[in-house]
Image (tube, rainbow, N blue to C red):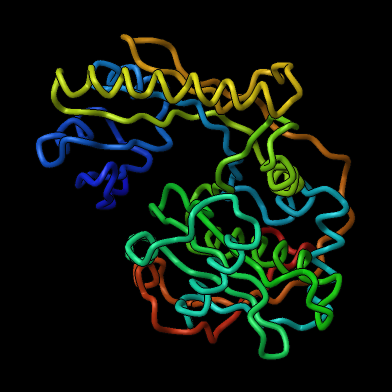
Amino acid sequence: MLTIPHSLFSLPSLEVWWPDEPESVLALLNQRPLITVHGCPDDTALSLDEYAFRRKSAATVLFDLTVPAVDLWKGQRRKCRQDINKALKRGPDIVLNGDTGAVFRLINDHIRRKRYRPPLSKAEWDGILSHGDVFSIWCEGVLISGHAVLVDAPTRARATIGGEIDRADKRFFGVIGPMNRLLHWHEMNYYKHCGVRHYDFGGVVLDPASPMYDISRFKLSFGGELVAENVLQLWRGALGRRVMRQLAARNVTRQMFHSVVRVGGRFGSIRADHEEVKDGPSQGGMALGPSHEPPASAMPDIRLFGSSSSLKDQVGNTGASSKSMWTVDATRPD
C-alpha cells in the first residue's frame, strides 16, 4: 500500500493506492480528515462504504508480469509490435531516473497541447518521485517521451502520467508514437526483471464519445486484462460527510448533463468509470475479462537499458541515469 500526502479542497489529505485491508485505511482517518483511496477491491470498498461520500468504478489494464516475456509480446496487437520494432531501428537510449526535470517539463508541455487536465504541480511531481520511477527515451540527444510510474513493490507498478514531444516535429516524423510504445514495453520488462507482479497501464475510458477514448485504445493494444476497481473518497466526520455527499451529487448531475450534450442528446453506453454518490453501502466494480489476439510473430532480441541494482534501491532514486542492460530473448525459456 502506498500513502502519498496530498491537498484537496485546500485541505491536507492523503492518497492511498492499493490498500491491503480496510483497517489500514481507517487508521489513516485519525491523521487526516479526507482520504482518497485508489485501486480498491470490492470487498475493501464495501467495508469502507460507511465513511465514503463518493465512489467510482474506474477501469484499468493489468499485465501479469509473472508470465514469460514472450507471452507478453504475443499478447500485443500486430501494430503495437511493429511500432516497437520500428522504434528500435532508430537506436534510442532509455534512461531511468535521469534528468527528471526535463521529463517534468515535457509532460507539462504535452498537457498544455492536449488540454486534458491542468498542468502537473511541483508538489504532485514530487509525490510521484518519492514513490516511484521516471523513465525517458532519447533519440539523437533529444527527449522524445517520458513516463512517471508509481511503484508498490512487489505487487504493482502503475504508469501514472506521461508525455511526448509534438508529433509535428519533422526530425522524428512517424517514430514518436513508436518510441512511446517502446518505452512502455521497456517498463514492463524492467519491473518483471525486478520481481514486480503486475504492470498497471493506468485508467481507461470505454465510452467512444470521450476525448480520452483514443488513449484507451492505445493502452488496450498492448493486451493485458481489463479490470474495474474502486476509487473512494472518505471523510472522517459524519456531518462533514453528509455535506460532501450533497456536493458530490450536484457534481454528478452536472457531469451527466455534459455527457448527454457531448453525444448529441443520447446517453452513451454504460461505462466502467461510472461514478456513484454514496448514500449507504453498495456493490462495486467487476472484472471485465482479458483481451484476446491471434498468435504473434517471434519477439525480437531487445536490448533494454535499465538499472541492474535492486528495485528497492531504485524506487525514489531520482538522480542516476541507467548504465547497464539486459536482454529479453524469445528463443530462451523465461
**Residue in the image at 83% along x and 39% along y:** 293
Outermost residue to the left: 30
Q: From the viewer's side, name the closer residue of 73 and 41.
A: 41
x and y, in percent, of residue 19 in the image: 32, 37
Q: Quadrant of the C terminus?
A: bottom right
Horizontal and vertical percent for residue 249? 40, 18
Looking at the image, which is closer to me, 133 or 72?
133
Is 184 placed above or below 280 here?
below
Q: Residue 14: which quarter of the image?
A: top left
Quadrant of the frame with the N terminus: top left
From the top left corner, tell me how far across and down residue 121 is, in percent.
39, 62
Q: Is residue 68 left or right of residue 47?
A: right
Res 42 → quadrant: top left
Q: Is residue 224 above or below residue 112?
A: above
Residue furthest to the bottom in view is 141
Tell me: residue 118, above or below residue 177.
above
Please count the marks in the image.
0
* Residue plotted at (54% across, 86% down): 323
Residue 49 picture quarter: top left
